Image: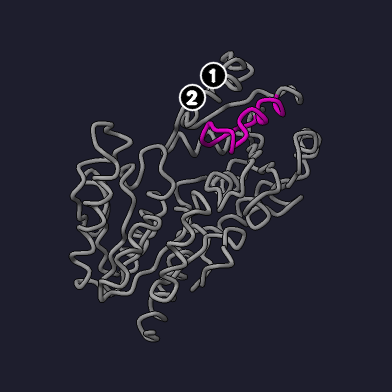
Amino acid sequence: MKIAVLSPVAWRTPPQHYGPWEQMASNLAEGLVAKGQEVTLFATANSVTGGTLAAICPQGYEEDKTLDAKVQECMHISYLMERAGEFDIIHNHFDFLPLTWSRLIPTPMVTTIHGFSSPRIIPVYARFNDVNHYVSISYANRSPELQYAANIYNGIRTAEFSLETQPEDYLLYFGRIHPDKGTFDAIQIALATNHRLVIAGIIQDEGYYREKVQPFIDGKDVVFVGAVGGEERNRVLGRAKALLHPIYFEEPFGLSVAEAMLCGTPVIAYQRGSMPELIQHGKTGFLVNNMQQAINSIKTLHTIDRNYCHTYAKAQFSQEKMVEAYLALYEHILTHPA
C-alpha cells in the first residue's frame, strides 16, 4: 500500500524530548516501513524516517518561535492534500483540521483521535462521520457523537526500553508540568512517604510551576531534571521505584504510563480517563482516587512483580501490535469501500 502519514508540526518527528502525537506518528510510520509498506511521512523538514519524508515546514513551531503556528499548519496540511491522489490511504495524526478536506479528496482518510482539546471541536468530527474512519486510543476517550472504525492502543518501540529489576529509592513524576497532570500532588505524595521525587518534563504552565512546584525543588528531596528523551528516558523510568501519575483530567492514553511498566516500574495513578485500561490494579500498579490513597499504596509497592509489569506492557502496548491493527484496518477500508 502507498500510505501517507500526516504528523503534527509542533515538534520534529520523532520528537527529541516532548511531542507524544509526533512520537506516535513516527512509531506507526517506521513500523509500516518495516512491514514493507510504501510510506510517505509528512512532517517537519528536520524529521527522520525510514520512509519518504515530505516537508514544507522547516522545523516545529514550538522549536522555532519565529514561525506562526497557524501558517505552518495550513501549509503543511494542504501540501499533503494536494497530493492525496498519489496514496491509497491517508493516516491523519493532526487532529480535526485535515477533516475539512475529507469530501474534496479521492483517498480514504483514517484519523487517530489523540484526545479532544475541548468538547467544542467535536462538531467538526461529527460533521465528517460519514467520510472518515475514526480510531480511538482508548475506549474512555470515545465520544457518543462519533462513529469509530476501531480502538487501537498506542504502540511503543519496546526495544528502546529495558527491564530494571533493581530500582533506586526514588519516585518519579514524568510529564507536562500543568495542573491537569497533578505535579503538586506528586510532590506531596513523595514528601509524605519520605521518598525523593524526580520531576521530568516540560513546563507548560509557568504560573502553576512558580506557585505549586518550584518552591519545593531543592535539588535533594525534589529534583527537576527537565525534559528527557532517548536513553535517559529509559534510565529515569526504569530506575524509579514507582511512577506517580495523579492526573486531574480524563487522559486519553498516557505514554509514560505504558513506558514505565515496560521498564518494570509500577504506576500509581488517579483513576481517571484511560488509566483503568492501561493499569492492572494490584498487578502493574495501583488505581487510586485521591492523594491519601496514593500515599497508602506506596507501602504495598513491594507486592508488584516488575517482571510481570514488563511482560504485560510488552504484550499490550508494542509498536508491532499497533502496526498490525492499523494494517488490518487499512485493508478492511480498501476492500470494503463505503
Q: Which residue is at a point 61% across and 34% down the rendered structure image?
A: 240
Q: Name the residue nearer the viewer: 300 or 256.
A: 256
Q: Which mark is residue 29?
A: none
- Residue kind at label 1, given as amino acid type: Arg
Dot 2, crowdedness within 10 Å: few (<14), some or many (≥20)? few
Q: Give the percent coordinates (x, y) of residue 263.
A: 57, 44
Q: Give the percent coordinates (x, y) of residue 36.
A: 30, 69
The residue labelled by disc 2 is: 206
Q: The magenta stretch spans which residues?
A: 171-190
Q: Which residue is at a point 74% across and 52% down the rendered structure image?
A: 281
Dot 1, crowdedness within 10 Å: few (<14), some or many (≥20)? few
The residue labelled by disc 1 is: 210
Label 1 near label 2: C-beta < 8 Å? yes
Q: Name the residue nearer the viewer: 201 or 247.
A: 247
Q: Which residue is at a point 80% across and 34% down the rendered structure image?
A: 292
Q: Which residue is at a point 78% across and 44% down the rendered structure image?
A: 303
Mark 2–mark 1 distance (CA, rounded to whole Å): 6 Å
